[in-house]
Image (cartoon, rainbow, N blue to C red):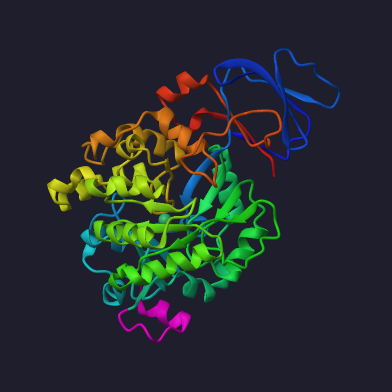
Amino acid sequence: MVDLLRRPEGLLLRDVEVDGTRTDVLVSGGSVRRLGTRLAGAPGVSEVDGRGGALLPGLNDHHLHLLATAAGRTSVACGPPAVRDVGQLRLALSGGTDWIRGTGYHESVAGPLDRALLDQLAPQRPVRVQHRSGALWGLNSPALDALGITDAPDGLLWRGDERLRDRERSTWPDLAGLGRDLARTGVLGVTDATPDLAPAALDRLVQADLPQRVLLLGAPDDWEPGSASLSRGPRKVLLHDEADLDVPHLVAVVRAAHAVGRPVAMHTVTQASCVAVLTALQEAGALEGDRIEHAGVVPPELLGQLVDLGVRVVTQPALAAAHGDDHLRDADPADHDALWRYASLLRAGVPTAPSTDAPYGPGDVWDVLRAARDRHTPSGRVAGSAERVPVATALAGLLSPLEDPGGPPRQVRPGVPADLVLLELPLAASLRDPCRDLVRLVLAAR
Ligand SMILES: [Zn+2]
């Protein structure tokens, strides 16, 4: 078990590797105080022998969904790879009579998700199952009855998270537990990319007392966090359907955010949304801090536009790898090079940082580092070999500031917050086989 120390007071880390040099690091009052060889100890200052292991600033996951991830930890997998056919799905939804919250459903399991399917598989207990896209919930009849929902005869709720949450007060997920577990993987900063967070969700995030700094893309413009750990980020703009791709509409959305000094975080997965979003940004004018979430398809002719606009991209290499077989099968071969770019964005000069998109993306940030290097699909193919980046490059992205994804990596220096991750091994050895087991000790400034 990784040790997690919060608000460290008086700690001397001996013989740690910082930027390739072995040194001692003194931490107190929540900050890094001094670096140097053979720093003097003092009464009340405890010491840790770093044994030459790398000391890094805390890692930043630049795009995830805290509440959904916390909820997902007590959910049942309803899609590949755990569940691949209707028999396995029936099994996943069986046993007991309590509510079941399923996630990760995909049509390849048992066709379209709806009330009839879920009633057939689980007629007795309330069941709600989320589509892999995160956009759609399917509920069975007992679930609709239990929640008093009468306006969804097919049992489908699009973007229904807030609605479901409002009706399920008792099932607020364990955010504090998630925060601790993320910290133990070295993640001490997260950008929550959930759009339009409701007041109850914001309260929940404030009260969770997470060890992470949290940047919220879904906080309203007038929200006052009341906690130094949380801040409002660029405004998340989700493109729900065709109507949202209307360029004049998008221009108005971008201008409204920019008018209050807020950059935008535009969700684009398809080529159509990439075209619409870049056209709208061109017309509205870009603001420093504007970002593209996912950039699932960027056709070559739009790369230059991305550079000219000066927007950054937050990508998900592990998602690209996990869904790579589907992408390679479903996408036009001529478009394969445009899928989930990373290396080509960096080469073009677009600041780009990786993230998990948990719970929709698999694994932790260490999986992201490996996926950035390998992009191995479940069937063992490589999804976009030209888009692979070295582990050190992806790590630099995780070390870039929450407010500047893809910008210069943070460093361990006197005066910086004591958000620190001590690894078992020096950096060069750690980069060869990145995995969460390398994390030995985590200090969180809050
Ligand atoms: Zn997301």
Magenta includes 150? yes
The magenta region covers 138-154
Answer yes or no: is residue 77 visible. Answer: no
The x and y percentages for residue 240 are 35, 68
Query: Which residue is at the far left?
Result: 333
Residue in view at x 35 percent, y 42 percent: 317
User: Which residue is drawn at the image coordinates 21% and 40% (left, top)?
Assistant: 379
Can the viewer see residue 208 in this picture?
A: yes
Q: Judge from the rendering whether residue 326 lies leftward or rightward of residue 426; answer left or right.
A: left
Where residue 435 sits: x, y (%)? 45, 31
Q: Is residue 225 left or right of residue 264?
A: right
Of the 4 image quadrants, the one containing the N terminus is top right
Q: Is residue 382 above or below residue 11?
A: below
Residue 111 on the magenta span: no
Quadrant field for ligand 1: bottom left
Residue 230 location, quadrant: bottom right
Residue 53 point in image, percent of width and height: 57, 20
Q: Quick check: 283 above or below 357? A: below
Would you identify the image quadrant in which residue 84 lies? bottom left
Q: Residue 154 appears at what percent x and percent y?
A: 30, 80
